[in-house]
Image (cartoon, helix red, strand yellow):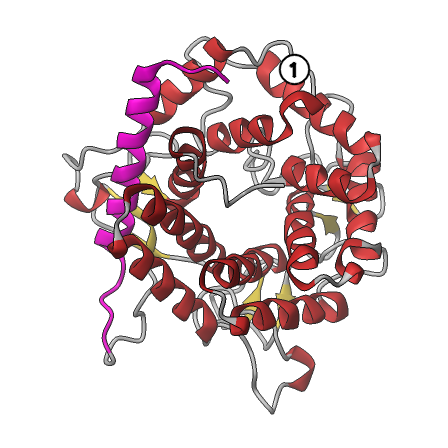
Amino acid sequence: MELSQATRARGLECARGIADWLCMVQARHGTDNPAAGTFPWAVEKSGQEHWANNWNLAFASMGLLAASEAFDEPLYETAALRMGSYLKTLQIFDPFKPDDYGGIREMTPQTPWCFPRDALSAAWAFVELHRHTGDAEWLERARLWGEWFLKNGRDHEGWPLWGYEFEPQWEGQARAMRPNLLGCFHGGSLNFLYHLGLATGDKKWTSEPLTTIANLLVEEIQQPDGYFLSIERETRKPPEADPQRGLHRANDDLSTLGLLCAYRTTGDERYLRSIETFLRAVFDAQRDDGSFEDSVASIPVVINVLHEAGDLVDVPAAIDEAIERALGVLYAAQSDGSRNPRMRGGLIEEGTYYVCARSSCYALIVLMKLFAGVGDFLRD
């Protein structure tokens, strides 16, 4: 990619604003604060805030670690490590729950369930925190979660479960676990398995579990139009209505990045062709304003896999001008805080009323990669 100096300068400015937003809204670090280290993953213009899930903390910590290196700002590293400390409190080491040893809860130490894909992202952050700090505890925590995942987090086909209950859900607050569906977003699981294998040197993480998920992803989850859709377990077809309302369409939840990891491991060309088919579909559908869909979260995800794959894929429509237009949409989504000062620096993901950590953290990681040369995260 040969992007203009103006695009590069705006990218660094946008990234700095996101990093500052994450630090501004992070919960106060104190011994009397049970939320210390976490943050609201969405802030609305009305003032309403929504606390982070485990995966929000995971990608926020990665983005802040990248920003701390790029901008030589210790505050960003401190905030990232505090997020990691909060993530530790979600991992189960309860002697009364031996079957769930190593599992990771969704939001708080009391949350009675998780989405395994979300928990996997938290374990992926443990791998990255180990790489950053050299502290072996982080890697052991990632490995223990991996063992939980192999034992409890997959179905009989080897496809990860949509949801998992550690205890009965609370009355009036139940979340659908959807055992009848194979979630398309689980292609992103390949990234964790790949990086855990690299970090531990243990090939068991990059053998059966990785190839099983990759093969199902390209053979059944990916549709003829190139996009990935969740399918019904019995019919092997997408349900009439997407239960996530298109959340993981152009934003493939890092599935194509995972396929790139699978290709690096196996050399199977089918995985590259799957990535190429997806990227062609996304860029061929790019809108006149530069966006790929209503949510701006897809923009850094798509540009990242294009950057990582490089010459391994051929996407004719992915020219520099198309990428610059997409980044322009991303930059325009940054809140100036005029609606609510606690929105300042975060990205308005869709519509006008809230900033969100999904798009913000993905963008922070990818902008640091493109314009500061910090390519340590969301890589193959």
Question: Depth check: 67 or 50 in front?
Answer: 67
Q: Is residue 252 left or right of residue 72?
A: right
Residue 202 in picture, x, y percent from top left: 75, 63
User: Magenta stretch: residue 17 in it?
Assistant: yes
Magenta residues, as a range?
1-30
Compared with 218, 48 (above or below) is: below
Q: Residue at x 66, y 86 (%)?
A: 98
Q: Is residue 67 visible?
A: yes
Q: Is residue 219 left or right of residue 352?
A: right
Q: Amino acid at mark 1?
A: Val
Compared with 173, 234 (above or below) is: above
Mark 1: few/some/many CA within 10 Å (<14, 14-19, 20+): many
Q: Is residue 223 visible?
A: no
Residue 304 in picture, x, y percent from top left: 53, 31
Q: Residue at x 67, y 42 (%)?
A: 258
Q: Main secondary structure of the magenta part?
A: helix
Q: Quadrant of the C terminus?
A: top right
Q: Residue at x 23, y 75 (%)?
A: 30
* Residue 215 occupies quadrant: top right
Q: Residue at x 64, y 44 (%)?
A: 185
Compared with 148, 251 (above or below) is: above
* Residue 50 occupies quadrant: bottom left
Count of labels in the image: 1
Residue 91 in picture, x, y percent from top left: 53, 74
Identify residue for label 1.
Answer: 315
Q: Is residue 107 left or right of residue 266?
A: left
Q: Is label 1 in a helix, a strand or a loop?
A: loop
Question: Depth check: 342 or 377 in front?
Answer: 377
